[in-house]
Amino acid sequence: MQTIAPQTPLDEPTPRVKYAPMAGPSPVDPASLFREMLGQWEAMANEFGGNLMKSGEFTRVMHGANAANMKLKEARADMMERALDAANMPTKAEVADLSARLHRIESTVDRIEAMMAAQTGQSTIPNRPKPKRTRTAPEKPGAKTTSKATG
C-alpha cells in the first residue's frame, strides 16, 4: 500500500502581492499614543494636586505631620543626650562648644606670643631641636651585600 503525503500550504508558492500606496491616514504610532496618554494623565494629576493643596484640610494635615516630625526629632535628641550623659560622653553641641573655646584660647596665645616677640625682637618661630634620624632606608632587592662567610 502506498501512502501519499498530504500537501501543505508550504508546498505551494505564495503569490506576490503588490500593495498600492494608501491614500488614507498613516498607521498608528504607539509611542505617540503613549505620549498623549501621559500628557493627559499629567494634566489630571496636576489639577487634582492643585485642588488638594488649596484645601484647608490638606494644610492642617501637613501642619500636623510637620509638628509630629519635629517632636520626634526632639525626642530622639533628648534620648541621645541622656544616653551620652549616662556613658559620661559629651554631646555634639558640647564638643562644638569646646572646639570654639579652644580656638579662641589658641588665638589669644598666638597674639600674646607675637606681642612678646615684638618687644624682645625675637622670631616667633621657636628654635626646637630637630629629631634624630636613626633609621636607614631598606636595601634594594638584588643589591650586592657583603657578608662574612664562616667555614
Image (spheres, grey):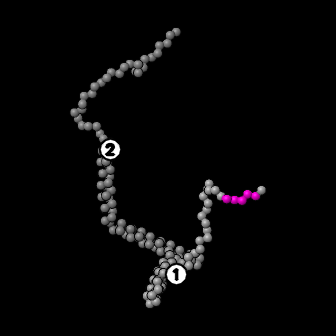
| Nearer the camera: disc 2 or disc 1 | 1
The answer to whether residue 115 is visible is no
Q: Is residue 100 magenta?
A: no
Q: Quadrant of residue 129?
A: bottom right
Q: Residue at x 36, y 19 (%)?
A: 13
Q: Position of residue 150 (x, y in %)?
A: 76, 58
Q: Residue at x 69, y 59 (%)?
A: 147
Q: Residue at x 44, y 72 (%)?
A: 70
Q: Which mark is residue 127?
A: 1
**Real-space Cα separation, disc 2 to disc 1, in angstroms:** 79 Å
Please say if 106 is above or below 69: below
Q: Is residue 14 left or right of residue 147?
A: left
Q: Which residues are magenta?
A: 146-150
Q: Earlier in the sequence, mark 2 or mark 1?
A: 2
Query: Image height check: is 34 above or below 72?
Result: above
SS at mark 2 in the image: helix
Amino acid at the residue labelled 2: Ala
Residue 149 belongs to the span the image colors magenta: yes
> The C terminus lies in which quarter of the figure?
bottom right
Q: Which mark is residue 31?
A: 2
Seen from the viewer's position, the closer of residues 103 and 77 is: 103
The image position of residue 12, as x and y in percent, is 38, 19
